[in-house]
Amino acid sequence: MCDQKLPTIWILGGPGSGKGTLCDRIVAKYGFTHISTGDLLRDEVNTGSARGQELVKIMKEGALVPTSVVMELLKEKIASKLESSKGFLIDGYPREKQQGEEFEKTIGPVDMVLYLKSDDDTMVARLLKRAETSGRSDDNLETIKKRLETFHANNDPIIEAYQSKTVIISAQQTAEAVFAEAETYLDSLQ
Ligand code: AP5
C-alpha cells in the first residue's frame, strides 16, 4: 500500500513519554504526515457511533482496542494521504508485536522505530499535569496506571523484534533536546 520510497517511522513510548510532542516538531521540520492512532480512535469516539462507544470503554480501562479496528482506521488515513505525503510518522503504533507484523504485511515496511524511553514517575507526572486541561477521559491516575501496565506488558517484544531499526532516545530531557537527538537519526533517512 505505501509507496516504497516514502519513509515510514513508528514512534513508540509509554503514555506521556512525549510521542505527540516530538511528532509536532518532526512535522514542522520534515513535513511528514503525522498519524496518531490514539487521535484516530478519539475521532471515532467523537462521532458518537456505536463502535465509538465500545472504544471509549476500552480506552478508559487503559487497555488496547482490537487491532482490526486500529488497522482499518490507519489504512484509511494512510490511503487518504498517500498522494501528498513526504513520509509517515505513525504515533502509538504498534502497541504489540503482532500489530507490527500486521502493518508490514498489509501496509508496508517500517524504516525506523523511534522509542522514547522514560521512567514511570516522569510519565505519570506529565499526564497528571496535562489532565488539568486535556479533558481526556483516560488522563486520571487510575487509568494512567492501567495504561502503564498495558505498555510494560507489550513493549519489550516489539523493541526486540525491530532491534535493527530501533533507536532509543531518552524522553527525560527537554522536548527540544529530544527533538535534537531525533534529528540526527532522521537526517540519515533523507
Ligand atoms: P494515545 O492517545 O496514543 O495515548 P498514549 O500512548 O497513552 O500517549 P499520550 O498521547 O497520552 O502521550 P504522548 O506520549 O503522545 O505524550 P505527549 O506528547 O502528549 O492512546 C490512547 C489509548 O488509545 C490507548 O490507551 C489505547 O486504549 C488506545 N490505542 C491507541 N493506539 C492503539 C493501538 N495501536 N492499538 C490498540 N489500542 C490503541 O506529552 C504528554 C505531556 O507531557 C504533554 O502535556 C506535553 O506537553 C508534556 N511533555 C512532552 N514531552 C515533554 C518533555 N520532553 N519534557 C516535559 N514535558 C513534556
Image (cartoon, grey):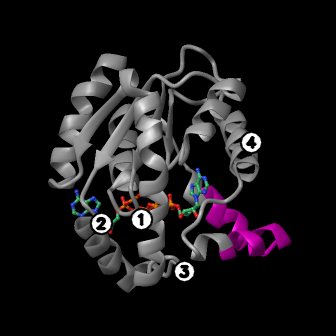
> What kind of residue is marked 2?
Met
Q: Is mark 4 within 8 Å of ligand 1?
A: no
How far apart marks 3 and 1 lie (CA) works out to: 15 Å
Closer to the chain start, of discs 3 and 1, is: 3
Depicted 168 relative to depicted 117: above or below: above
Q: Is residue 50 magenta?
A: yes
Q: Is mark 3 within 8 Å of ligand 1?
A: no
Few, some or many residues within 10 Å of mark 2 (<14, 14–19, 20+): many
- Residue, x 33% and y 56% (percent of image)? 18
How far apart marks 2 and 4 lie (CA) works out to: 31 Å
Residue placed under numbered mark 3 in the picture: 137
Closer to the chain start, of discs 3 and 4, is: 4
Look at the magenta stretch and give its main secondary structure: helix
Residue placed under numbered mark 4 in the picture: 76
How far apart marks 3 and 4 lie (CA) works out to: 25 Å
Q: Is mark 1 within 8 Å of ligand 1?
A: no
Q: Is residue 190 visible?
A: no
Q: Please identify, in this view, whether the residue under mark 2 or under mark 4 is nearer the observer.
A: 2
Depicted 139 relative to depicted 107: above or below: below
- Residue, x 24% and y 59% (percent of image)? 119
SS assignment at label 2: helix
Q: Position of residue 168 (x, y in %)?
A: 27, 37
Q: Is residue 156 magenta?
A: no
Closer to the chain start, of discs 2 and 3, is: 2
Disc 3 to disc 1: CB gap under 8 Å: no
Residue placed under numbered mark 2 in the picture: 123
> What kind of residue is marked 3?
Ser
Which numbered circle lies on residue 75? none
Few, some or many residues within 10 Å of mark 4 (<14, 14–19, 20+): few
> What kind of residue is marked 4?
Glu
Point out the stretch of residues depicted in magenta.
Answer: 40-57
